[in-house]
């Protein structure tokens, strides 16, 4: 470690960073409140149901859900237990590898997310896109793409860990 002061953010960088930080905090809270009020789902539950509904099998490993939701596996396990009690999904052994557990969307869960989606989409549109116009939306898209690319290139663990006994491509190792 050096004795030099770090290169602090400029006033403009600090303003933008604090604004982005506010978005990262406030937007999930607002989306969660809307879902709770209109659909009796948390944002995390919605992410799980929506993610499963987009898969042809309606199933995913709990470890994949953990990555999708940015939640610890233990938290996902408790969440899945609560959702299972509500009839929204069920646990099943992974047919490809019985060491893993899958969450499988039930018909009730599929119907619940189908009913919740229009209100969620309307809230996303109202909070993010309505005030931007076409030019603002396109610029936000380009900015987000650049940030995601920068984070993806960083030396940080932002990809799901490779399961034991599997290569990075998902194939079984010999």
Image (cartoon, rainbow, N blue to C red):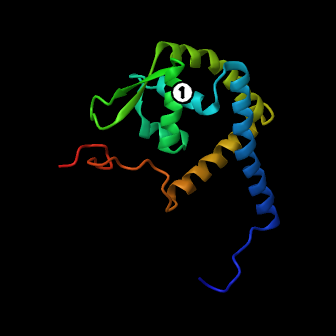
Q: Nearer the viewer, residue 7 or 91?
A: 91
Image side of residue 35 versus residue 154, left or right: right
- 10 or 76, which lies in front? 76
> Where is mark 1, residue-wise?
82
Give the left or right position of residue 69, taking residue 105 as reference: right
Left or right: residue 30 versus residue 117 is right
Q: How many marks?
A: 1
Helix, strand or loop at mark 1: helix
Q: Quadrant of the N terminus?
A: bottom right
Residue 93 higher or lower than 72, as above or below? above
Point 72% across, 37% down: residue: 29
Residue 122 in the image: state x and y as whole percent: 72, 23
The image quarter containing residue 40 is top right
Q: Quadrant of residue 4?
A: bottom right
Q: Residue at x 51, y 54 (%)?
A: 152
Looking at the rendering, which quadrant does residue 134 occupy?
top right
Please state if 129 lies on the left or on the right of 103 as rendered. right
Question: Residue at position x 73%, y 51% from top?
Answer: 21
Which of the two residues, 136 or 53, is positioned nearer the viewer here?
53
Within 10 angstroms of label 1, few (less than 14), some, or many (20 or more) residues?
some
The residue sitting at the bottom extreme is 3
Q: Residue at x 26, y 48 (%)?
A: 165
Please say if 48 is above or below 74. Answer: above
Where in the figure is residue 28, as x and y percent of width and height?
A: 69, 38
Q: Position of residue 157 (x, y in %)?
A: 48, 56
Percent x, y of residue 113: 58, 19
């Amino acid at each position: 470690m050096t004795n030099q002061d770090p290169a602090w953010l400029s006033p403009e960088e600090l303003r933008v960073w604090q604004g982005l930080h506010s978005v990262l905090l406030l937007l999930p809270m607002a989306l969660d409140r809307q879902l709770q009020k209109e659909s009796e789902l948390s944002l995390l539950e919605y992410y799980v149901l929506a993610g499963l509904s987009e898969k042809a099998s309606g199933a995913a490993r709990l470890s994949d859900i953990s990555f999708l939701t940015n939640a610890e596996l233990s938290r996902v396990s408790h969440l899945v237990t609560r959702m299972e009690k509500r009839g929204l999904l069920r646990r099943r052994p992974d047919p490809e590898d019985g060491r893993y557990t899958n969450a499988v969307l039930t018909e009730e869960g599929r119907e619940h997310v189908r009913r919740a989606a229009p209100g969620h989409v309307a809230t996303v549109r109202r909070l993010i896109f309505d005030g931007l116009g076409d030019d603002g939306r396109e610029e936000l898209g380009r900015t987000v793409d650049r940030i995601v690319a920068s984070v993806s290139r960083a030396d940080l663990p932002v990809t799901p860990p490779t399961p034991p006994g599997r290569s990075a491509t998902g194939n079984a190792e010999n």
